[in-house]
Amino acid sequence: MKRAIFPGSFDPFTIGHFSIVQRGLQLFDEIIIGIGVNQNKKTLFSTDQRLEMIRQAFANEPRVKVQVYNSLTVDFAQQVDAGYILRGLRTVADFEYERSIADANNKLTGIETVILFTEAQYAFISSTTVRDLIAYGKSIQAMLPPNVHI
C-alpha cells in the first residue's frame, strides 16, 4: 500500500489543501492528513476545530485519515508507516524551503517527498490570507472545501 502523509498546521484547511489531497489520491492508496502541533505558533482555530473541518471535507472519502502529531514530521511519517510526504507548492519562494526539508527528511529516513503544484485558481489562497479575511469580517466560504463551514 502506498501511504502518504500531508502535514501542516491547516489553520484553516483551505480549498487549496483540499485540492492537493484530492489530486494526491490519484497517486496514493491512503493519505493521512497530519495536523502538526507547534507550541510557538499562535492559531486561530483549536486543534479540535481543525480536525473537525478536515473530517467534514473528507467525510465521504475513506482513504483519507486525519491525525494530530507533536513530533518531527518525518518521525510522524515513520510512526504511521508512510513512505511519502505529500506537499503543495504555491509559489517559487516555497520551493527552496520545501526542497531543503525534503532533502533532509530523505537523508534521515529514506522517505520521499512528492510535491504537487497548486492549481492556478487556488494559488492566491493561503491560510494566512483566510485568517486575515476572517479578522476583517469578510466571507471566506469560496476559499474552503465543500462541506466545510466556519
Image (spheres, helix red, strand yellow):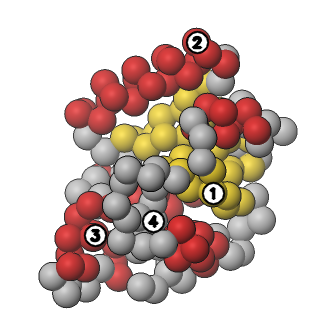
Q: What whole-number distance in Å separates the C-alpha atoms at marks 3 and 1?
A: 21 Å
Q: Mark 1, mark 2: which one is toward the viewer? A: 1
Quarter of the image where the C terminus is located: bottom left
Q: What whole-number distance in Å separates the C-alpha atoms at marks 2 and 3?
A: 34 Å
Percent position of residue 56, x then y? 60, 78
To which residue does mark 2 refer? Answer: 107
Q: Nearer the viewer, residue 138 or 30?
A: 138
**Which class describes the residues within 10 Å of circle 3: few (<14), some (14-19), or many (20+)?**
many
Quarter of the image where the N terminus is located: top right
To which residue does mark 4 refer? Answer: 13
Q: Which residue sits at x=65%, y=24%?
A: 111
Give residue 68's mark.
1
Q: Kindly check if marks 1 and 4 are in contact, taking CB atoms under 8 A apart as contact.
A: no
Q: What whole-number distance in Å separates the C-alpha atoms at marks 1 and 4?
A: 14 Å
Q: Is residue 75 above or below residue 80?
A: above
Earlier in the chain: of badge 1 and badge 4, it is: 4
Earlier in the chain: of badge 3 and badge 4, it is: 4
Classify residue 21 as left or right of residue 26.
Answer: left
Earlier in the chain: of badge 1 and badge 2, it is: 1
**Which class describes the residues within 10 Å of circle 1: few (<14), some (14-19), or many (20+)?**
some
Q: Secondary structure at mark 3?
A: helix
Q: Amino acid at mark 1?
A: Val
Q: Which residue sits at x=23%, y=57%?
A: 124
Q: Is residue 116 above or below residue 58?
A: above
Q: What whole-number distance in Å separates the C-alpha atoms at marks 1 and 2?
A: 24 Å
To which residue does mark 3 refer? Answer: 130
**Which class describes the residues within 10 Å of circle 2: few (<14), some (14-19), or many (20+)?**
few
Q: Secondary structure at mark 4?
A: loop
Q: Amino acid at mark 4?
A: Phe
Q: Amino acid at mark 2?
A: Lys
Percent position of residue 63, x then y? 75, 58
